[in-house]
Image (spheres, helix red, strand yellow):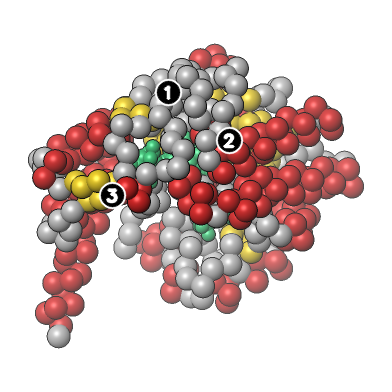
């Protein structure tokens, strides 16, 4: 299986925008719209700097799309996952344009839609951490629920003004099933168990309503957990694989976790973004559950990850109640038979391959960290 993590320090990363302040680079994007460039299709991706946004953008670029990405203003760099595919605004014929915007700011959404004139919109932007949503419920609703509504409405108006057709993908979540019994699919009633999940349910129904009311081509992907070496470090899989690498290299000696009994249907993000794209290529819009159909507990993920590095997890893991959630989702396991049948989609990466890919990537990162520390110590 091909290793898909972005190569830090590679020739591609050498063209990185890290070395230049974003404020210096992005404004030029406004002056260089995509309209003159002859490409088959144009897509707008919100959440382009996230795990899924980076894999989806790679996929779209490989298919010849002009990709526009919405990037949040941040006081530190938030483009690490897309540096390797980004090119400077001054380069001719570039296929990736970034725009400052925010799902909580409809003025920016409207402007970006008008400028990018996308054929397809992938709404992946969200405050995506379930536990954090209990601490930031109002912001989560604003970005994840109202953000979708704002974007849908901009697309609707843009279509009315221009007569263009825009297809819309909404990043729905298996969290929406919450307490519903597995296996869950498109027919399973939602029972959300967090402010995040409630917001995603609202987005789901906004999308259904806009599809029915205005005849828009809108698809809700109901994606079960999907991971990768690019997964955010506070989600449990990455927290574990990162700890494995760091423990192996003596950079960490304890890993604090919460509920080890929860079960999730974990797939590989690189496989799942293909399903997003496929949804928007169909003749009719629809909603699709995307999953592997296999579930493992957090404890089983731990066992697998530590054993990849020849370590016994029991020696390092401690339970900290701060990582428990006020209401937990105990068991998610998807039935993706509709996606298999209609989209001809199936996952290509097994659970064991996924865990190994993440452990190997994080072990390399820990090794690099160790070498960097040694070099720094040597220079003093
Ligand atoms: P992620 O890595 O957390 O990325 C989230 C993206 O949303 C980032 O680019 C983030 O920007 C952006 N964002 C956050 N708040 C925003 C705002 N107010 N305005 C504009 N952009 C904002 O998430 P992911 O794993 O790639 O997931 C992508 C989408 O799928 C999310 O909507 C998530 O809820 C949903 N989903 C994920 C999974 C999964 O297992 N990964 C499963 C089902 C559904 P910064 O980089 O600046 O933070
Ligand atoms: N994050 C985290 N940190 N989770 C822990 C920990 C810990 O230290 N210890 C145990 N867990 C448990 C959580 O309680 C949960 O049951 C499970 O591990 C998975 O947690 P996360 O990795 O945070 O993912 P999630 O399932 O809550 O949410 C992810 O998947 C959803 C799809 O079902 C996110 O990507 C959501 O955005 C996505 O919608």
* Residue 4 placement (x, y as % from top left): 36, 44
Identity of the residue drawn at 55% across and 43% down = 196
First in residue order: circle 3 vs circle 2: 2
Total numbered labels placed on residues in the image: 3
Identity of the residue drawn at 73% across and 45% down = 149
The disc placed on residue 16 is: none
Disc 3 target residue: 320
First in residue order: circle 3 vs circle 1: 3
Disc 2 target residue: 172
Q: Give the vertical position of 106 relative to 75 (above or below).
A: above
The residue carrying pointer 2 sits among few (fewer than 14), some (14 to 19) or many (20 or more) residues within 10 Å by Cα, namely: many
Q: Give the vertical position of 179 relative to 38 (above or below).
A: above
Disc 1 secondary structure class: loop
Disc 1 target residue: 333
Mark 3–mark 2 CB contact (< 8 Å) = no
Q: CA distance from mark 3 to mark 2?
A: 30 Å
Q: Is residue 362 left or right of residue 127?
A: left
User: Considering depth in this image, is 206 or 228 the residue closer to the camera?
Assistant: 206
| Residue found at the very far bottom of the displayed protein | 380
Badge 2 residue CB within 8 Å of ligand 1: yes
Badge 3 residue CB within 8 Å of ligand 2: yes
């Amino acid at each position: 299986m091909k290793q898909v993590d972005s190569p830090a320090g590679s020739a591609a990363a050498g063209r990185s925008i890290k070395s230049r302040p974003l404020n210096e680079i992005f404004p030029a994007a406004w002056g260089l719209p995509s309209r003159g460039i002859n490409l088959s299709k144009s897509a707008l991706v919100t959440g382009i700097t996230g795990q899924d946004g980076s894999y989806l953008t790679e996929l779209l670029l490989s298919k010849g799309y002009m990709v526009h990405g919405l990037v949040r203003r941040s006081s530190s760099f938030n483009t690490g996952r897309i540096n390797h595919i980004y090119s400077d605004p001054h380069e001719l014929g570039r296929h990736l344009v970034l725009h400052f915007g925010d799902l909580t700011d409809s003025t920016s959404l409207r402007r970006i839609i008008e400028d990018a004139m996308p054929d397809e919109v992938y709404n992946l932007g969200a405050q995506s951490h379930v536990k954090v949503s209990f601490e930031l419920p109002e912001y989560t609703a604003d970005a994840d629920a109202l953000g979708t509504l704002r974007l849908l409405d901009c697309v609707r108006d843009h279509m009315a003004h221009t007569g263009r057709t825009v297809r819309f993908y909404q990043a729905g979540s298996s969290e929406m099933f919450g307490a519903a019994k597995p296996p869950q699919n498109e027919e399973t009633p939602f029972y959300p168990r967090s402010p995040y999940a409630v917001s995603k349910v609202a987005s789901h129904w906004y999308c259904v309503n806009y599809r029915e009311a205005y005849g828009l081509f809108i698809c809700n992907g109901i994606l079960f957990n999907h991971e990768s070496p690019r997964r955010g470090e506070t989600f449990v899989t990455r927290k574990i694989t990162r700890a494995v690498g760091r423990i192996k290299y003596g950079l960490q000696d304890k890993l604090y976790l919460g509920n080890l009994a929860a079960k999730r249907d974990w797939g590989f993000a690189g496989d799942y973004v293909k399903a997003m794209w496929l949804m928007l290529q169909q003749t009719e819009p629809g909603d699709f559950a995307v999953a592997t159909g296999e579930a493992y507990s957090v404890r089983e993920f731990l066992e697998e990850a530590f054993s990849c590095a020849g370590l016994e997890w029991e020696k390092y893991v401690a339970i900290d109640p701060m990582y428990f959630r006020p209401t937990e989702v105990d068991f998610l396991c998807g039935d993706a038979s509709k996606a298999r049948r209609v989209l001809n989609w199936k996952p290509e990466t097994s659970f064991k391959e996924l865990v190994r890919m993440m452990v190997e990537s994080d072990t390399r990162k820990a090794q690099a960290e160790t070498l960097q520390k040694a070099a720094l110590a040597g220079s003093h």
